[in-house]
Amino acid sequence: MTPLLLIPGMMCDARMWGRVPTALPGPVHHALPTEGETIPDMAGAILRDAPARFALAGLSMGGIVAMEMLEQAPDRVVRLALMDTNPRAEAPGVQARRAPQIARALAGDLDGVMRDEMTPNYLADPADTATLDLCMAMARDLGPEVFRRQSLALKARADRTETLRRFTGPALVLMGAHDRPCPRDRHELMHRLMPQSRLVVIAGAGHLPPLERPEPTITALKEWLTA
């Protein structure tokens, strides 16, 4: 079976996928977008160590890196799942917030940046303290230098809509119904760019469906992998 490569979101590691990896068929590989200071460099580093051909799923920043991998090596990506992500270049308003966030994180307040500016936008249920605690733990383990590199990479990322338009393999576009960082219009755009794709909206989830609503997320991924 074709191996599956999973790429998590910003300041997340393999724990972000929860029970998803063990519930899916075939070999599953994890990759972190932490090497380099640009999306192309991060994508290239993952491709360097990836299987020759693979199914590819990325969430949020992981989806942005996945789209760049597709741009760099379209012949290696057999299937594509883009989850709670955005194919557009970063909006100027978001770009403007990056430098103050980086400065604050490097000054020793990564926890404050995550607590005040990041995690409040993640979940459909803000009372889900276990998931919020996990997000904070993953961020602490990765640390402020990874935060700096990932922030710079996201700030300068390219629009990858034309990359998606060229992809003809089995595709899944999945989002939480209450995703605030990556709203529905971005996912409908990706679905239009890949008309062969399936658009799945997970009720009761925000930006992190694998942790918030694992069962419907697993079901959608299984269907994509066997389509």
Image (cartoon, rainbow, N blue to C red):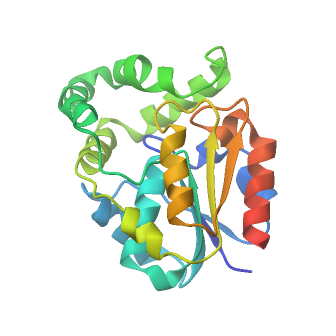
Where 170 falls versus 156 (above or below)? below
Identify the image quadrant of residue 205. top right
| Residue drawn at point x = 35 percent, y = 71 percent | 44
Taking 171 as reference, is 149 above or below it?
above
**Residue situated furthest top in the rendering:** 127
Left or right side of 197 for 150: left
Q: Position of residue 161 (x, y in %)?
A: 39, 62
Could you say which quadrant of the image residue 158 lies in?
Answer: bottom left
Residue 52 can be seen, yes or no = yes
Q: Is residue 167 left or right of residue 160?
A: right
In the displayed structure image, the side of residue 117 where residue 131 appears, left or right: right
Q: Position of residue 88 (x, y in %)?
A: 35, 51
- Total labels: the figure holds 0
- From where the camera sits, is residue 8 visible? no
Q: Residue at x 43, y 64 (%)?
A: 67
The x, y position of residue 182, in whole percent, is: 48, 39
Location of the N terminus (image quadrant): bottom right
Camera-nearest residue between 151 and 227? 227
Q: Nearer the viewer, residue 93 or 25?
A: 93
- Image quadrant holding the C terminus, namely bottom right
Does 128 appear above or below 38? above
From this view, report whether residue 131 is shown above or below residue 87: above
Residue 51 is situated, as x and y percent measured from the top left of the image, at 55, 80
Q: Going 59% across and 67% down the picture, which residue do you hit? A: 195
Q: Is residue 88 left or right of residue 178?
A: left
At horizontal 55% and vertical 50% (from top left) the residue drawn is 188
